[in-house]
């Protein structure tokens, strides 16, 4: 972790609660008055080819998950109006070749090959290239999407007053909780048939809009950081602007996150890298230590009843 990251860890929590709202106001003011419409500024922007939705997805050396993710995504969005921007963080496992081949056959797919791994900074950089009015942030470990999920999310966002950042719901089973918190941490509200569970919300499959981005600012970037809570930062700014943040109960995806799923795909090292880069991330989200303690002395996964 960088020296700046170490410094952030040492800031007392009460002081963070004072500093963050001040910073959020500056960011929102900048994007509203100084540099509005950033999401429309692309050198190759063609106003005659504006999709309704831009999806942005960051990936790094998780080819097996990415293949399942994009196969399911493209299968369940046939005929829909969207573009998909995939930011490849200098992967070395065949991801580049796979994406180049896939994009050659699919004009809706735009691939950005970053010369180095910039981690979650790629979210803000991808969003800045987006041309659609609605923007959906995706994780490459969302490996199953239901039929009709895209128009359902767009319809929900349109129908909910002051919508800011709304995520798809997730399957929770013996391998993963989908990164969703316990049920008691959510308050369900019915907006004319669209149920939103207000509470902790992540960026695994989450919709916002250009209007919201121009109001609260783009996703954050952190110098010399690979993993950080870009979704938590953005959601907090939305709530600070009195915009609604939550989970759409009736749109359910499979978010194969956490140590057990990553281990099953052969990517446990990605979890280790994530929590080494940001110990504060480990404290908030990780089940890595508990998972490691459940292994036997030979390094094999222990059987659980």
Image: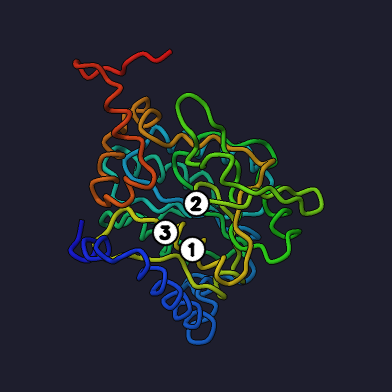
Among all residues in the image, which is located at the extreme bottom?
34
| Position of residue 251 in the picture relative to residue 90 (left or right) | right
Check disc 2 and report its element: helix, strand or loop.
loop
Q: In the depicted view, which residue is nearer to us: 34 or 103?
A: 34
How far from the left and from the top, in percent, is residue 11? 28, 66
Residue at x 56% of width, y 46% of height: 185
Q: CA gap, disc 3 to disc 2?
A: 8 Å
Among all residues in the image, which is located at the extreme front?
14
The correct choice, above or below, for 197 with respect to 221 in the image is above
Residue at x 41% of width, y 64% of height: 125
How far from the left and from the top, in percent, is residue 71? 53, 35
Residue beneath disc 2: 203
Image marks 3 and 2: residues in contact by CB distance under 8 Å: yes
Residue 230 image label: 3
Residue beneath disc 1: 234
Q: Earlier in the sequence, mark 2 or mark 1?
A: 2
Residue 81 visible in rendering: yes
């Amino acid at each position: 972790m960088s020296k700046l990251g170490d410094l952030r860890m040492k800031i007392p929590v009460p002081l963070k609660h004072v500093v963050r709202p001040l910073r959020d106001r500056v960011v929102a003011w900048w994007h509203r008055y100084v540099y509005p419409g950033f999401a429309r500024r692309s050198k190759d922007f063609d106003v005659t080819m504006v999709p309704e939705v831009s999806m942005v997805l960051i990936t790094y050396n998780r080819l097996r998950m990415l293949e399942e993710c994009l196969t399911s995504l493209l299968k369940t969005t046939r005929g829909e109006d969207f573009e998909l921007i995939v930011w490849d963080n200098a992967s070395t496992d065949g991801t580049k070749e796979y994406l180049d081949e896939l994009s050659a056959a699919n004009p809706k797919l735009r691939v950005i090959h970053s010369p180095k791994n910039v981690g979650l900074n790629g979210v803000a950089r991808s969003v800045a290239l987006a041309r659609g009015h609605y923007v959906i942030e995706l994780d490459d470990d969302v490996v199953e999407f239901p039929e009709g999920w895209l128009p359902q999310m767009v319809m929900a966002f349109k129908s909910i007053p002051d919508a800011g950042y709304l995520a798809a719901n997730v399957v929770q089973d013996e391998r993963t909780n989908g990164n969703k918190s316990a049920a008691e941490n959510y308050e369900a509200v019915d907006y004319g048939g669209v149920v939103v569970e207000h509470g902790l919300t992540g960026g695994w499959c989450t919709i916002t809009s250009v209007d919201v981005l121009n109001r609260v600012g783009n996703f954050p970037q952190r110098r010399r950081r690979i993993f950080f809570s870009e979704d938590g930062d953005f959601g907090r700014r939305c709530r600070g602007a009195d915009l609604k943040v939550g989970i759409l109960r009736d749109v359910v995806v499979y978010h194969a996150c956490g140590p057990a799923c990553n281990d099953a795909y052969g990517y446990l090292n990605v979890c280790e890298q994530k929590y080494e880069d940001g110990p504060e991330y480990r404290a908030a989200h990780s089940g890595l230590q508990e998972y490691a303690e459940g292994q036997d002395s030979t390094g094999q996964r222990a059987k659980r009843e």
